Amino acid sequence: MMTSLDVLIETPEMTKKNQVFASSGLVSELLTDMRLRGVQYRRIQTGPDFGMGFEDKPGHAYFHYVAVGTAYIGTDDGELHKLTAGSAAFMPHGRRHQLLSEAGIAFEEIDKFDVAPLGESVSGVDTCPSTASVPIAVIFYGCMEFDLGGMQRIGKLMPTVMVADTQAQSYPGLLPVLDSMKREICAGRIGFAGILARLAEVAAAMIVRGWIECGCENGSGLLAALRDPRLALAILALHRQPGREWTVAQLAAESHVSRSVFARRFQTTIGVPPLRYATELRMRLAKQLLTHEKVSIDVVARRLGYTSQAAFSRAFKRIIGRPPGADREVL
């Protein structure tokens, strides 16, 4: 017969199950907050020698997929990342870089190349010399607006270049998506350009998920919280009910620890107090709603638990650095 003592004892097996559940749920919730909006896509066909430069684009991300051939990504810090056929790279910070056939080759800015429309938001760049019967490399690239929503603290930890080797265990579901991209690129069927754009967004999200899952071992902040089943439970609750007027005691109850233990562990791991994190989360979600979903300020305020628009506006300006009306004006 089970006693009250048995209920309080958590076996290693239970701890592992709770950790997997909490971490998996939090990763899913974080990815739900993430927004990738394609701004520009291009299919590039090249000869044996090519060099293309991409400008620094804060608030955006770059995605490169090599369908045929080999390419190198060169960054301003001198690093060189090799992409073979079937490989993809995601650059979450939108940093300036080059796409090269080999290290040290001269390059020209991508916007200076002639383009041919292939579909809505997708163009073709063909630098393959007339003497070549087939292109040596075929590359699909995208430049996307990248809004991390509740993942802002994770975003700061992301590397400049995230290369996805389709054979790696970190990306078990990515290979079929990239294979589909290759088929669309090579077949050129009706509507392929729009399908490529959607597949690129899915592939980018899967790369981010793979990095979160395998990057937790050496991560800090929110990544470290993913390894802590009790913190993950509280953070998951915050993300699922951002408009609730949470107290530290309520969040501690979600984590099944005392208020003092929870507050200390949260501050040490995340780097900010629990209620500060909750406010930052609300304001990042508010920014998404205002800027991209055209929701009115008063509706956003109510949805996120504020009883007055004035209180919401003060919190928004304190966290984001400008009044919420400024985000409405950029529409």
Image (cartoon, rainbow, N blue to C red):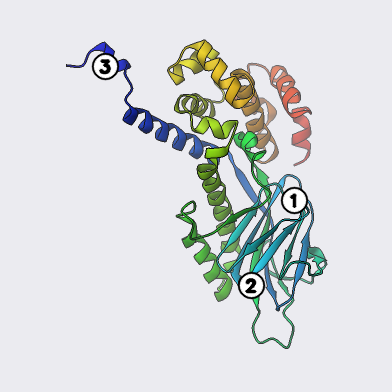
- Tell whether label 2 touches label 3 (CB within 8 Å): no
Image quadrant for the C terminus? top right
Tag 1 or tag 2, which sits nearer the N-term? 1
Give left or right: position of 290 versus 173: right
Real-space CA distance between mark 1 and mark 3, rounded to the nearest whole angstrom: 54 Å
Amino acid at the residue labelled 2: Val
* Residue identifier under label 1: 95
Secondary element under disc 2, as helix, strand or loop, is: strand
Nearer to us of marks 3 and 2 is 3
How many neighbours does mark 2 have within 10 angstroms: few (below 14), some (14-19), or many (20 or more)? many
How many neighbours does mark 1 have within 10 angstroms: few (below 14), some (14-19), or many (20 or more)? many
The part of the image, by quadrant, that contains residue 247 is top right
Amino acid at the residue labelled 1: Arg
**Closest to the observer, 100 or 288:** 100
How many neighbours does mark 3 have within 10 angstroms: few (below 14), some (14-19), or many (20 or more)? few
* Residue identifier under label 2: 138
Real-space CA distance between mark 3 and mark 2, rounded to the nearest whole angstrom: 61 Å
* Residue identifier under label 3: 6
Residue 224, numbered label: none
Do we see residue 299 in this rendering?
A: no
Give left or right: position of 220 versus 172: right
Real-space CA distance between mark 2 and mark 1, rounded to the nearest whole angstrom: 22 Å
Residue shown at the point (79%, 72%) measured from the top left: 114
**Closest to the observer, 99 or 186:** 99
Residue shown at the point (55%, 58%) measured from the top left: 199
Secondary element under disc 1, as helix, strand or loop, is: loop
Amino acid at the residue labelled 3: Asp
Nearer to us of marks 1 and 3 is 3
Residue shown at the point (32%, 31%) measured from the top left: 13
Tag 2 or tag 3, which sits nearer the N-term? 3
Tag 3 or tag 1, which sits nearer the N-term? 3
